[in-house]
Amino acid sequence: MRPESTWGWQDLRDYVVREIEARHGPQVRNPKTESSIFKSFLTRWSDQAVSIAKVSFEVHNGMWRNAPISVNRFCVASDPYFAAVIAANL
C-alpha cells in the first residue's frame, strides 16, 4: 500500500470499501457514484481525508451513531454529522 500522504481518491475508496466489506459484508457498488463521492471527499477534506476514514473504522469500528458506515457517509450531506465531528477530534 502507498504512503497515506500520497493517496488519491481510488486509494481512499479502496480502503473504505475494503473496511466496510470486512465489517458488514459485500455491498452493492456503483463505480460512478463512488468516484464522485471520494473525489469530492478528498477535495473537501484534503490532508484530513485519510485520517477521517481511518478513525471511522479503526476507532469507531465501522459504526456511526449506531448505524453501519457506508460509502454514502462520505457524501457532502453527511459532513456536519460525520466528517466534521471526527476532524474536530483529530
Image: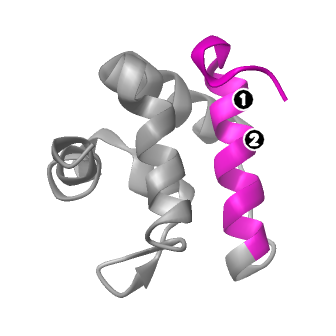
The count of marks equals 2
Residue 74: x percent and y percent? 42, 47
Secondary structure category for the residue under label 1: helix
**Drawn side of residue 58 relative to residue 1, left or right:** left
Q: Please name the residue that numbered disc 2 is placed on.
A: 14
Q: Is residue 70 visible?
A: yes
Residue 4: x percent and y percent? 63, 24
Q: Is residue 29 visible?
A: no
Q: Main secondary structure of the magenta part?
A: helix
What amino acid is labelled 2 in the image? Asp
What amino acid is labelled 1 in the image? Asp
Image coloring type: one colour
Give the distance between the C-alpha atoms of the residues marked 2 and 1, in whole angstroms.
5 Å
Report if the CB atoms under discs 2 and 1 are less than 8 Å apart: yes
Magenta stretch in the rendered image:
1-22
Of all residues, the one furthest to the bottom in this rendering is 66
**Drawn side of residue 23 relative to residue 85, left or right:** right
Secondary structure category for the residue under label 2: helix
Locate the N terminus and report the quarter of the image it occupies: top right
Q: Quadrant of residue 11?
A: top right
**Disc 2 crowd, CA 10 A, few/some/many (<14, 14-19, 20+):** few
**Drawn side of residue 39 relative to residue 6, left or right:** left
